[in-house]
Image (tube, helix red, strand yellow):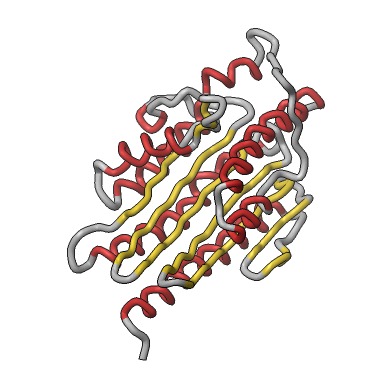
Amino acid sequence: MLSGEDSRRDAVKAIMSSGQRELVAELERLDGGARFGRPAPRVRLLENGDVFERASVCMTSADGNGFFTTGLSVVIHPRNPYVPALQAQFRYCASGSAWWFGGAAELLPCYGFAEDAAHFHRVLKNYCDTLDPAFHAQAKRAGDDHFRLPHRDEPHGIGGIAFDHLRPPGPHGWRRAAAFTAAGIATIAPAYLPIVRRRRELPHGERERQWQLYRRGRYVELALFRAASAARADAEAILMTLPPLARWEPELTPEPGSPEADLASFLVPRDWAGETVATIS
C-alpha cells in the first residue's frame, strides 16, 4: 500500500504528465506542420514547425536524499516575430513532512500589442482568483520581479505571474494547491494560443526577423544565468529550451519612434489586467 506522501507524488506526477500530453496535442493542432519528438525521457520537443520554430514541453522529476520534486516546463519560440514567445513552469516539492507548489508564466513580445497583453494578464488573473481574490496582485508583483534581467536591470518580457512555497492551510490545503496547479497548466493554452492565432499571419520581413533574433538574445541571457546556478539535470532542461537562432549586439539602438523603440516602454510593468483596450476582431 502506498504511503500518504507516495500517493501524493503519484497524483502530482499524473497532473504534470496529463498537462504535458494535452498541451502537446493543442500545440500540434495549431502548428499543423510539425510533431513533437522525444529527444529524452519525458521531454517533448517540436522544431521547424509552420507556426513554432521551437517548442519544448518538458516534465522533470528528481527523488533523492529525502527530497522530491517534479514539474512541467513550457517554452515556445514562434516563427513570426509578431507572435510573442512564452515560458511557463509549474512544480511540486516535498521534503519530509514539508511540501509546497510553485509556478510562473511570462509573455515575451518583440512588438507590443496592448490587446495581447491585456488578454494574457486577464486570463492569468481569472485563474489566480480561483484560489483567492487577493492572490493575483501578489503573484503579479512576484512575476515582475522574477522575470527581470538582473545584470541589465530591465524587464525580460511583460511579466505574468510567479509564486513559490504555495501551501494553503487546513486539512484540504494539499488538494487545493494541487488543483490550482493543474488549473494553471490548463490555463497556458487559453492565455497564449488566441494571441498566436491573432498574429501568426501578419506579414514581416528581414528587419522584424533580426529584431526577433536580438530579443531572443535577452531570453538566452536569463536562461544561461539560471542554468549556471541550477543542478545539472535542471541546467540541461533549461538549455534544451533555448531558441534555435538568436543574435547579440553590444548595444542596439532602434530608430526613434519605431515599433522596435516602442518596446522598451511597453515592457514596463503595469496593470494590464485592469486596463481597457480596444479589441480587434
State which quadrant residue 233 falls in.
bottom right
Q: Residue at x 25, y 48 (%)?
A: 132
x and y percentages locating residue 90 in the rendered image: 46, 56
> If the image is split into quadrants, where does the N terminus sit?
bottom left
Horizontal and vertical percent position of residue 115: 50, 29
Front one among 168 and 67? 67
The residue under the point 49% across, 61% down is 71
Q: Residue furthest top?
A: 256
Q: Nearer the viewer, residue 152 or 85?
A: 152
- Camera-side residue: 86 or 170? 170
Residue 193 shows up from this direction: no
Left or right relative to 134: residue 92 = right
Up-down relation of residue 254 to residue 156 (above or below): above
Q: Is residue 65 above or below residue 129?
A: below
Q: Is residue 214 above or below residue 67?
A: above
Residue 219 visible to an observer of this rendering = yes
Residue 28, given in percent of the width and then of the height, sits at: 67, 58
Seen from this angle, which residue lies furthest left? 170
Residue 127: give x, y in percent of width and height: 36, 48
